[in-house]
Amino acid sequence: KVRKLFIEIQKSNLSNDLSNVRSNISDGMYRRFKTQFDMRKRLEINEKISNLMILNTSIDRYEKDFDFDILKVGILAAPSDKFISNQAPSGEESSNKKTIEYWSFMRKSGVERYDLYNREQCPKCSAKLIKEDLEISKCTECGELLNSGKHDWVLFEINELDDYLINSKFPA
């Protein structure tokens, strides 16, 4: 699920469309991505990614937070990134270096699991889910919230390695 979501979010990032990942990300992550999309649009910056490879994923930590399970997963990837600016072509950047990010997922403890990553039906009413890039991720038939963590893991935070280590409860 982590690998699939990582690839889908990279695609969403390039297309400025979160419809394929909306039910798998928290409302906070949705707003974060939308803000990034808006900033890039205003600054006329385009991102190009090629040869994206996930080299490794590993669970760094599992925690309980009241009624939720929290899973922190490290992702080692090697993308070829290029940022192209129409406003300032001299400020264009390219990168081919490996990157490590830590993705934090949550789900409600003790509830029946449903695979929102590979199914296209609502976990409550079984209606076909319509993939839309909307502020709120819910079933159009019954109104069930899809990204509450009640049904499956939901991405709620992404940290670069340095930020993750600084904010970690444990010394590096």
Image (tube, rainbow, N blue to C red):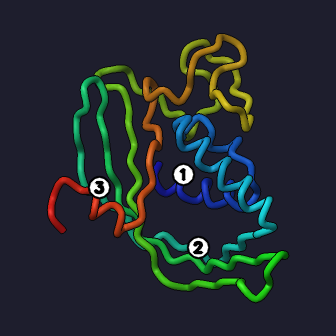
What residue appears at the point 53 percent right and 39 percent down from the top-left corner?
28
Q: Which residue does the numbered mark 1 point to in the structure image?
A: 5
* Viewer-side residue, 21 vs 161: 161
Rendering coords of residue 22 (x, y %):
63, 38
Q: Is residue 14 left or right of residue 110?
A: right
In the rendered image, which quarter is residue 47 located in?
bottom right
How many numbered circles does the render carry? 3
What residue appears at the point 64 percent right and 85 percent down from the top-left corner?
94
Q: How many other residues sit within 10 Å of disc 3, few (<14), some (14-19) or many (≥20)?
A: few
Rendering coords of residue 151 (x, y %):
46, 26
Rendering coords of residue 9 (x, y %):
60, 54
Disc on res. 59: 3
The numbered mark, 1 or 2, whose residue comes first in the sequence reads 1
Amino acid type, label 2: Leu
Amino acid type, label 1: Leu
Q: Is residue 107 left or right of residue 127?
A: left
Disc on res. 52: 2
Image height of 65 relative to 90, above or below: above
What residue appears at the point 64 percent right and 27 percent down from the top-left corner?
136
Residue that protrudes farthest toward the left in the picture: 171
